[in-house]
Image (spheres, coloured by chain):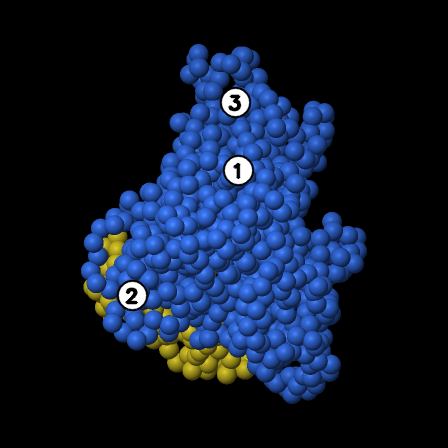
Chain colours: A yellow, B blue
Amino acid sequence: MVTLKVNGQSHGYDGDPSVPLLWVLRDELGLTGTKFGCGEGLCGACTVHLGGTAVRSCSVAVADAAAQEIVTIEGLDPEGNHPVQRAWRETSAPQCGYCHAGQIMQAAALLAVTPKPTDADILSGMSGNICRCGCYQRIAAAVRLASTGV
Amino acid sequence: MTHMFEPTVIEPGQVANVSRRSVMKGMVGSGALVLGTSLLPRPALSAWDTGAGKMPGGTVNDPHVYIAIESSGLVTIITNRSEMGTGVRTSLPMIVADEMEADWARVRVAQAPGDEKKYGNQDTDGSRSVRHFIQPMRQCGAAMRAMLEQAAATRWGVPVSQVRAENHQVVHLGSGNMLGYGELAKAASALPAPPVESLKLKDPKSFRYIGTGSVPIVDLHDITTGQAVYGIDAKIPGMKYAVIARPPVVGGKLVSFDASEALKIPGVEKVVEVQAWPWPSKFMPVGGVAVVARNTGCAIKGREKLKIVWDNGPNATYDSADFRKQMEATAANPCKVVRNDGDAEGALKSAAKVVTAQYYVPHLAHASMEPPTATVHVFQGKAGPECVAYAPTQSPGGCRDDLAKVLGIPVENVTVNVLLLGGGFGRKSKWDHVLEAALVSKATGAPIKVVWTREDDIRHDFYHTVSVERIDAGIDVGGKVVAWRHRSVAPTIRSTFAAGADHQAPFELGMGLVDNPFSIPNLRCENGQCAAHTRIGWFRSVSNIPHSFAVQSMVAEIAATLGRDPKDVLLELLGPSRIVDPRKSPEVDSFWNYGDPFETYPIDTGRLRRVTEIAAEQAGWGSALPKGQGRGIAAHRSFLTYVASVVHVAVDDKGGLTIPRVDTAIDCGFHVNPERIRSQIEGAAVMGLALAKHGQITFKNGQPEQKNFDGFIVTRIDEAPLDVRVHIVPAEWDVPSSGVGEPGLPPFAPALCNAIFAASGKRIRSLPIGDQLKV
């Protein structure tokens, strides 16, 4: 049995401990805000915070996530009002929006470490997250806005 | 059977505390309503004729179908189209709300399940949604407004001319009395929809939402909090998770499999064979072996342990490098003539100079961030077998029909619920993934969620075609282009439907080949024989990608040959403002104008000239740039919309490419949501860069060589064009609405490559650019 602490709540998982955290979050705990994109840590759609750090949940075995606090998009802010979330709405960043949970989690982690990022910081910090619709102009603007106050 | 997401069917005319039965009865009593049909004759009120009526299901404008008002005043407006990022789930209901004078803050949007008889055509593709439904939706809203006014007038006992609907209430002009929409809901909904001739559409000047760009997409908040429900997020209690091992080569088949090791993986519960249909068979599943497990992670692990013997079939020798040589050989010789103005052959022979170039665009994968997926339950219902599907699908109607066929049950017993699409780009117009989930559900008796891994998606796509385009342009002694011969060689999408199809269909030829707008007296288009060896499908903007890349690159090549400005040459080739009618050109057969009447949507070179001039002017065309920088321009009409892009690039001394700025002008006629038009064009620049710079699927031994985002490269933020300026040509209601989702893409790659030439002198004729710029 693996015990996970997700968004402040404890959950037990009695299945194969080597499966990626992503599928336990989505399929076992019903936290579908975290998205599947590639399964190889290449696209960032599945980004969550593990012990305060942005990780690709498709590439972390669920057993390895047991010891630390996991935060998903559902738990980023109780009201959905994290500055990054507000900035995202302010800029109408999403098109299809599918990758945006991962984008937001990545941006929130970036700003937690680098509250006043340069444009270069934003581009390098967000370059692991793919958006096929191509919302990058607004993603960059949203991260900048979140860092300067919404 | 309880499903977590009940189908969002709003019964016609539903109001609070009124049963379906009584409403139905009331409507039947009125003697005026036929549910699910277009009550209002189209031509009577249409400002312009469209091809919408020829689509499956046609159009529906009945407010009883699309609008429900609760006694609280909450208005529910149904959208019949799928949301995949264009904003259409917001835009279409916004049209209804504006016309019916609803307060958007009190409007809820509901998604129609697949039912084209009831909701009209639901194929969200071809950049058709607004252009085919803006008129029916305006009529729908106007009819509801009239019904609300009538209900208020009856309540007050005053002539309807004395009342006016305004912002969610009806006002009696004489007394100032007011009744809210909620108070009028029951009476208004029970009225028959008025005849279309009687409807008074709003003066566009009084629109509250249409054209303002002030309404955010309805799912915006939920997207930012992880609450938005995409196809992959569907939940049915008791569902199991499946991944499928599919034949690695199109046309191949399963010989045998051994699941014993897979079944040892913890969490794996069942392994079942998936029925296969021989290629080509439209969107039928290719078969394979499904691993069913308690979660997707276990299913993937189980699949890795399957031992499978495949027969790879006749396409096992498909090799992209060899195939390219064959296509080039075809393009070197005369092909089937598909347009023939004047005498291009003779004019090329007598030309003072001939510029020849050959262009190549490889196969592309859609790679929507949400891969194909579906959650389906096939079960024994009270009245026989039923099927409930939840899917990110662009085509719930066609999907529903095929589910019924595959399962052998009446279509009425099949429900297809449309959830948000995590991107579509044409991939989700094909519903093979939904059929797969149904087959596995039927075989296991459980609700099944099938997820395609990224490798599945990239290796089993309906790929964008691969294309060789050869153009020969003859120039006379005065420097005028007098001859143009364009040979296009590419596998056709028809090959996915019919064995042996080996020439492009009219709908492909009409996307940038035979609709060439240039003012050249001798203009010949040819189409080479080319058989497909994989599944070819629609990819955002389809054949416009290779055709536009070739044509618009060639314009700049001619300019370079003549030592002239590419924009001037482009405008000269576009010629004077006029209507170009390919139907009048010799050898053009069944000219395809995106399925819409040419009379409504002619090829207007004046509009193409205008977007060219706007993009150039806004980009500062002609102003000096530092060494190593350059601008390129391209203009293209597709999906009945006119787009021109100017791309500004910098190429450093190592061949590194950056894009400081893009200016795109778009003329899509009367438009609803300029803010979402901007986002589509911004995104088109990113996707355009992806396909120009990196995108390719190459085949070896019949199989794609790319597997994931490390092989099929898409644009990331650190190389994306971040300064994309969108210039929307203003249009009044008298300019018919045209497409938005796709037309932004075709001009980008040629404008980019023309800019690279201007900056570096390097001409890119073969996509992707890859490392061709490396020094």
Q: Nearer the viewer, residue B433 or B591?
A: B591
Q: Which x, y percent locates residue A47?
A: 40, 70
- Mark 3 or mark 2, which is nearer to you? 2
Crowdedness of circle 1 by 10 Å Cα count: few (<14), some, many (20+)? many
Q: Which mark is residue B200?
A: 3
Crowdedness of circle 3 by 10 Å Cα count: few (<14), some, many (20+)? some
Q: Secondary structure under badge 1?
A: loop
Q: Quadrant of residue B499?
A: bottom right
Q: Secondary structure under badge 3?
A: loop
Q: Which x, y percent locates residue B7?
A: 62, 50
Query: Are dots 3 and 2 on a single chain?
Result: yes
Mark yes or no: residue B634 visible: yes
Q: How many discs mark residues in the rendered view? A: 3
- Residue underneath mark 1: B601
- Mark 1 or mark 2, which is nearer to you? 2
Q: Which x, y percent locates residue B47?
A: 53, 28
* Side of B740 where B595 appears, left or right: right
Q: Which x, y percent locates residue B50?
A: 58, 36
What residue appears at the point 20 percent right and 54 percent down from the top-left corner?
Answer: B624
- Residue underneath mark 2: B760
Q: Using the image, name the chain to which the residue with label 1 belongs.
A: B
* Side of B325 where B695 appears, left or right: left
The mark nearer the N terminus, 3 or 2, is 3
Q: Using the image, name the chain to which the residue with label 2 belongs.
A: B
- Kindly identify the amino acid type of the residue bearing the numbered disc 1: Tyr
What residue appears at the point 49 percent right and 58 percent down from the top-left corner?
Answer: B471
Q: Using the image, name the chain to which the residue with label 3 belongs.
A: B
Q: CA distance from mark 3 to mark 2?
A: 58 Å
- Kindly identify the amino acid type of the residue bearing the numbered disc 3: Lys
Mark yes or no: residue B680 visible: no
* Side of A120 where B457 appears, left or right: right
Q: Quadrant of residue B749?
A: bottom left
